[in-house]
Amino acid sequence: MGELISLKNVWKIYREGEENAVFALRDISLIIKKGEFVAIMGPSGSGKSTAMNLIGSLDVPSKGDIFLDGHNISHLSESDLAQIRGKKIGFIFQQFNLIPNLTARENVMLPMIFQGSDEFEREKRAGELLKLVELEDRVDHLPSELSGGQQQRVAIARALANDPEVILADEPTGNLDTKTGEKVMDFLNKLHNQGKTIIIVTHDPNLAIENASTTYWLKDGKIDKITKKKGKNKIVGNEK
Amino acid sequence: MISKEIIKYSIDNLRKRKTRSFLTIFSILIGITTIFIFISFGMGLYTYVNSFVSESSADKVLIQPKGVGVPGIDKTFFFDEEDLDAVKKTSGVYEAEGVQILVVEAEQNNIKKFVFMTAYDPERPLMLEISNLEIYEGRSLTSSDRGKVVLGYNYLIEDKIFPRKLEVNSRIDVDGKSLTVVGFYDSVGNPQDDSNIYITNDYFEDIYPENSDKYDMITARVDTSDIDRVITNLEKELRKSRGLEEGKEDFFVSSFGDLFESYSTSLNIIIGFIVLIALISVIVSAINTANTMITSVLERIKEIGVMKSIGARNSEIFNLYLFESSFLGFIAGVLGVFFGWIFSLVAGNILEGLGWSFLSPYYSVELFIGCILFATITGGISGVIPAISASRVNPVDALRYE
């Protein structure tokens, strides 16, 4: 499997140069391969959200380089980053973050608009994706008319809109009860089995261990350890 | 790029904040309505004035007293026969006529009204040509008509001047003399002209001998190829006949071009002033719109973050907000034009009923489109700063925003 995302000696420093500078990430290096299921784990303040923002190209590092599909995206403009995100990365958020006054179908269509696909194609694909997440009977419902689990499934469909290579999920089950959370994870696993690269960011070790093939444990902005799932969960190494 | 979904998203957002959108639209609408009303009436006035210049009045000049009271009321000033002869002899003048104007008391069934009587020479009806008067009913006067009058249009309307309308061949008492009505002129749109009584100058002098050979104004038909030279000549000849030095004239000569120009200038100033006030109100409402849009950006900062995370570029977010504020302006423009149109129609009808039909609005496609476009652009401009701030939102911060 080839490299999809790699972070090379990445630092993220807020208020750099000031007395109260915050070192959110310190010299992080990691490689995510195509088709991998990766979890980024850590307590709050460990830097996992910052890591997600950098991997998801929502932000650029203070130092170091980030490669996505072989391209260095560390110094790109915001608009270029937006295009890359829209095409290659599908986001799933803890709060679902659907646009409240657009229907399920329209929410799923939105990322395709930003990529310039035509209306017929958008509608067709949105319908297929909502069917995939078993919401074909809810296409014209507003987010407020859907349960939390259904909203998160719409968000999954939206994340898949432009057929991205990576699904980046930030605490995807954080706002759901266990059963609904499991269903959402089932979908993510299904997508993984279809060849998508899945990255979840979570503070829940069970979620990470049960699903991810590789888990990066973050602590104080550094990778504390990496766990690989090979039959049984086993720690294979520590990294600074 | 503005897609159907984005338009729906924007309109839904405006609909969701009904009161705020309504107030914003309302504030722009007031200015647009005012602008529409005054421009439509202004254009109506231009059209009215223009009709004089383009028609039979173009080759006429008017000689009037300067700085003295209203013709027909102030009798201390007049042109005499010698002045009229001087005018007639001036080079470039084809013909001239002295016009006598007098306030008279007209009576019908013991109801008395003071109106203007205009006496003119039916052989040379220059005065009528200037006013664009045309017979509506009956006939106009001839030189041999004695004891006969033609009346303005308002005498044909019940309760306008008299409770009962007059007809051809009915009689009207003027200063105690019973005169026969032979015709009516069509409406010219201003109450004074439409209430006039017209009489031949010969008969006028018979019944008002004290006013004979005293003209309140002189009208002349002149060579239009060099009208300024004719005016200079007229001033020179009249100064001579009235024994006045240059610069101390008690009269002034104006061509219709001059009249039109001075009329248009004052009209421009008045309309310009009102439109300026309306423009200020539009600027204030533009600031209000900008404020509304900034609030809207703050409220939707998380949505902006979400859109950016799913691939929206800065320019797309910018367009989205610019569209929203332009759309607000567009709606305000459409409604403003609609209300302005209704208001000016109603006001025009009321004014026409009052005999002021010269104050009737004139509509052109440009006015409708112009007002709507202006409102849309105003809305758009108000949206620029909020749209820039929305487009610059940092997606990481925005997603964290609660």
Image (cartoon, rainbow, N blue to C red):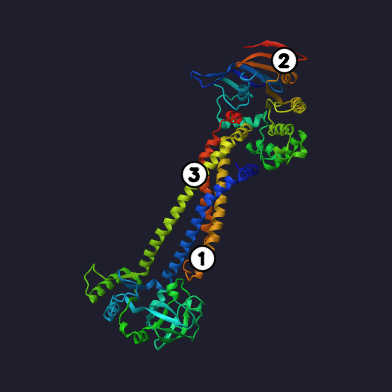
The disc numbered 2 marks a residue on which chain? A
Crowding near the residue tagged with mark 1, few <14, some 14–19, many ≥20 C-alpha atoms within 10 Å = many
Calculate the distance from the C-alpha at mark 3 to the C-alpha at mark 2.
59 Å
Residue B189 located left or right of residue A122: left
Q: Nearest the camera: B178 or A71?
A: B178
- Please, what is the three-letter code of the amino acid marked with disc 2? Lys
What secondary structure is found at the residue carrying circle 2?
Answer: strand
Label 2 and label 1 in one chain: no
Calculate the distance from the C-alpha at mark 2 to the C-alpha at mark 1.
85 Å
Q: Determine the residue located farthest toward the front in the rendered image.
A: B110
Residue B295 located left or right of residue A144: left
The residue that disc 3 covers is B287
Labels 1 and 3: the sequence-earlier one: 3
Pinpoint residue B207: horizontal percent, then vertical percent.
36, 86
Q: Quadrant of the N terminus of chain B?
A: top right
The residue that disc 2 covers is A228
Depicted B74 relative to depicted A113: above or below? below
- Please, what is the three-letter code of the amino acid marked with disc 1? Gly
Calculate the distance from the C-alpha at mark 1 to the C-alpha at mark 3.
33 Å
